[in-house]
Image: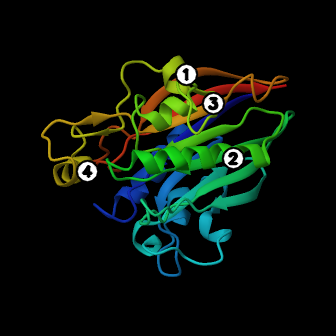
Amino acid sequence: MRIRVVTLNVWNTQGDARRISLINQELRALQPDIISLQEVVQSENIRMLDEILEGLDIGSIHQVDLQRFLPPFADQYGGTAIASKWPMRPLEALDLRLAEAPDVPWATLAAAVDVPNEGEMLFIAATTAWRPSAEAARERQVQAIVDLDLRHRRALPTIIAGDFNADPDSSSMRFLTGRQSLGGRSVLYHDAWEIAGEGVGFTWTSDNPNAKAGIDQIIRQSEYHRRFDYVLVGSWDGHPKAHALVHSAQVAFDKPRDGIWLSDHFGVVAEIDVGL
């Protein structure tokens, strides 16, 4: 079964208010089957997820649907959401706040998606600590994400998509892609971009005016280009009777519409053939 996965950090409510409608237009054009969204503000007063998915005929789950309380900063910086054109069941919202990363209101969200003619597939919408110096926290967080997969894994390969705030050479991403161990353990997920993407695939870059303000404030370098956003697929080791063949991976939301840049991140769209 060929599925199209999209991930995008939508940058909460910052920037031009028209961005949300334009993100909706871009999603309508992409026609994804499953979407991972980060920094989505969903509260009594702001229904950002509803606006993003308006008219798409697609179901959704937000972390607030599973959490018993709203983490600090969530009303400002939002949370994580999954949207699917197929039926899905929410499984868990993993709170990843740590002592060295207390200001992370975004949970990592797991859902079982009913892929037509194939069965249930575990889909994880993930994000990790945002501070450039917080790689130690990200190491612990990605291990927790792997444990989340192990708790809910199905026969079909798990797909993990989101903003990891870490480039491919970081220890957290090297761990996920099987290049190094952490805590005496090792795993392997295939990076869709590495398999089928063209070029470097930067998703948080000073070429994006929305990102440049944050880069100027946090990084304080005039040129900064990183690939922080990923679609990862489970490997043979975890799913010996199934396959997830990556056919394509492209950067999305990387051009302005009507002169407006859609987010401070670019997104990723990947086409994957999954089956048993």
Instruction: Classify mark 2: helix, strand or loop.
Output: helix
How far apart are the alpha carbons under marks 2 and 4? 34 Å
Residue 147, which numbered label? 2
Q: Residue at x 52, y 52 (%)?
A: 37
Name the kind of residue labelled 2 in the image. Asp
Q: Residue furthest left?
A: 222
Earlier along the polypeptide chain: callout 1 or callout 2?
A: 2
Q: Nearer the viewer, mark 1 or mark 2?
A: 2
Secondary structure of residue under mark 1: strand
Q: Is 270 on the left-hand or right-hand side of 200?
A: right
Residue 214 visible here: yes
Crowd around label 1: few <14 · some 14–19 · many ≥20 (10 Å): some
Relative image position of residue 136 (x, y in whole percent): 43, 47
Q: Earlier in the sequence, mark 1 or mark 4?
A: 4
- Quick one: quadrant of the N terminus? top right
Nearer to us in this view, 97 or 29: 97
Q: Amino acid at mark 3?
A: Ser
For residue 186, which numbered disc appears in the image? 3
Residue drawn 54% across and 50% down? 141
Tell me: 168 left or right of 246: left
Q: Amino acid type of disc 4?
A: Asn
Q: Position of residue 210 (x, y in %)?
A: 25, 50
Which of disc 1 and disc 3 is earlier in sequence? 3
Q: CA distance from mark 1 to mark 4?
A: 27 Å
Which color scheme did the rendering employ for the protein?
rainbow
Q: Are marks 1 and 2 in contact (CB under 8 Å)?
A: no
Q: Earlier in the sequence, mark 3 or mark 2?
A: 2
Which tag, 4 or 3, sits closer to the chain's start?
3
Is 211 in front, or is 228? 228
Residue 27, x across and y down, in percent: 51, 45
Residue placed under numbered mark 1 in the picture: 248
